[in-house]
Image (spheres, rainbow, N blue to C red):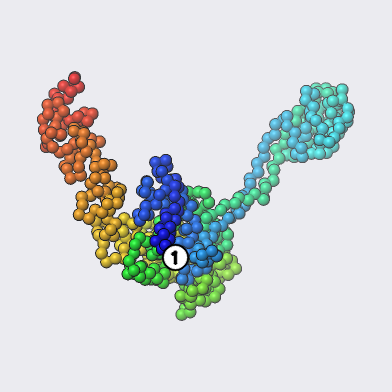
Amino acid sequence: MEIEKEVKKITLGHEIGAGAACLKCKDKCEGFELHFWRKICRNCKCGVEDHDVQLESEENKKVGKLFEDTKYTGLIAKLKRDGLPSYRGNQVTFSIPAAAISTATPVSPSTFVPGSSQTSSPSTQSARAPPVGATAAPGAAIHSPAAPGVAIHSPAAPGAAIHSPAAPASGRIAASGTGHTGTIPSKGPGAATTVVPTLTAVPAKTDVVKSVTYEWAPPGINQCMALRYMELLPPEQRPIAGSAGADYRKKQMAKQLPDHDQDPERCHELSPSEVKLMQQYVRKYKDEALGVGDITVPEEMGLQAGLAGEKGPQGLGAGGKPGAGTTGMPGDKGDAIATMGKVGAPGASGTSVGGPAGNYLNSSPDLCPQSCHRCQLPMKKGEPAVYAERAGYDKLWHPACFVCCNCSELLVDMIYFWKKDQLYCGRHYGDSEKPRCAGCDELIFSNEYTQAEGHNWHLKHFCCFECDCVLAGETYVMENDKPVCKPCYMKNHAVCCAACQNPIEPEAQRVSYGEHHWHAEPQCFQCSCCSKCLMGQRFMALQGMLLCSVECKKKIMAS
């Protein structure tokens, strides 16, 4: 019965994302099928992050597990169903006012715009219909609301004339409007008249709002500062819902924070001693390395550093973070997701620039003496900067510079690991602590493992990348940085000899020229005309044929 439960559990675990299309291989992949221990698709060898798999709930559980039993419990919530911790990703929708710019647009002479400041006079060929709900009687006067005092008589009445109180005795009709005044020559009673357009600026709409949803935004700060933080990120890395930036965040969440680096249950066949070692490793990085970046402004951080004393800087919250308004002791297990709070521009409420610690602010109107810990360029006043508690109060980063020192990728959701004065993502922090198996992608907690081709391997995982046969003591070939056994190589990767058409074995010597290959043997690498052995000789190639001389070339071309 217990075996059946275990088999069912494994099967369900491998059903996650089953059949999902590969975003890289497209139709070449039959659908996602998770390899039993390689963490890749059996069909196309791509990772789960390269498939159209909805892993939001699984990723939230993974990060929730990461923050469990740390000072960052404010970022997680317990699931009611199974009691597991789940990450609250802080999806935010910003409402951004979009100012509309009005321009004056000429109106066609044959167009009358109700409510505008132009005066319209119908021609004898086309009579304008009266407003809806009104009846135009012959000879009735229709007054335009835009031009008071100008009476327009309907041409439906025979001999109707257009009268204007402002018309001079010379027979010209005055057209009134905002911006200019024009006159229209009149050739006699009942003559056709034209519309005189006037260029009128339409007031800009002030209620135009654009909504942008981000899959994640820094928590605990006001909308303006959070939006400015996003603007300082590379455009292709902004996690706007449905964009390439959201896909980038999804892939980095899977790559930077592998669940098998923190949960023994996600690993393949760990021994009890290995499980214990892994638990100790997890506890160590939670206590000594794991952190979440905060958003602050450089001048505020300078004040905190200047005012720091034995009890910590003024205004530090739990865990020594700025902005909580209270002082907490390092190591508190409470809700320690305190950030700068409502961070605003310099001089806003809650920001003080006076005193000895703030004297440096007068040195430059825009720049602070503090520089980015990565690029060494000065920080700008009022601009969002990233602060890492474990790094200390004297270190700040530009939003786009808060990256892993190894892969230089933006640290997803500002989750970092601090070691030896450097920022790491979870994956490369693990690599700096333990060897990682190139087969299963898990950290190695065993004392015995294999080193081959510049990589580390579990003893049982140094296998053919295609058929999973164990390669210990066997001939193998590295293809695309993956070990492949000889039978799989001969079947799927070996090149054929242009002379004998047989595949060339990996141990055999061969000669290659362009896209053509030959066995390095006299019976294969010879002149196609006179059969002269060309080993160590000059030759020329013609459409895959080897020739020893110009004479042989002429014979071949003549035949």
Image vertical order of residue 473 relative to residue 115, above or below: below
Give the x, y percent position of residue 509: 16, 42
Query: Does the rendering let one see residue 462?
Result: yes
Q: Quadrant of residue 369?
A: bottom left
Give the x, y percent position of residue 277: 34, 69
Q: Looking at this view, name the residue that lies furthest to the front.
A: 1
Q: Quadrant of residue 180?
A: top right
Query: Does the rendering let one see residue 308?
Result: no
Residue 105 shown left or right of residue 367 in the figure: right
Q: Quadrant of residue 104?
A: top right
Residue 231 shown left or right of residue 469 in the figure: right
Which residue is at 32% across, 66% downward?
271
Give the x, y percent position of residue 30: 41, 43
Residue 498 shown left or right of residue 77 in the figure: left
Image vertical order of residue 117 relative to residue 335, above or below: above
Image vertical order of residue 44 relative to residue 285, above or below: above
Q: Where is mark 1, residue-wise?
A: 66
Which residue is at 35% across, 56% downward?
37
Which residue is at 39% across, 41% downward?
28
Give the x, y percent position of residue 16: 45, 53
Q: Looking at this view, name the residue that lies furthest to the top.
A: 558
Residue flagged by tag 1: what amino acid is it? Leu
In front of the other: 407 or 128:
407
Q: Quadrant of the N terminus?
A: bottom left
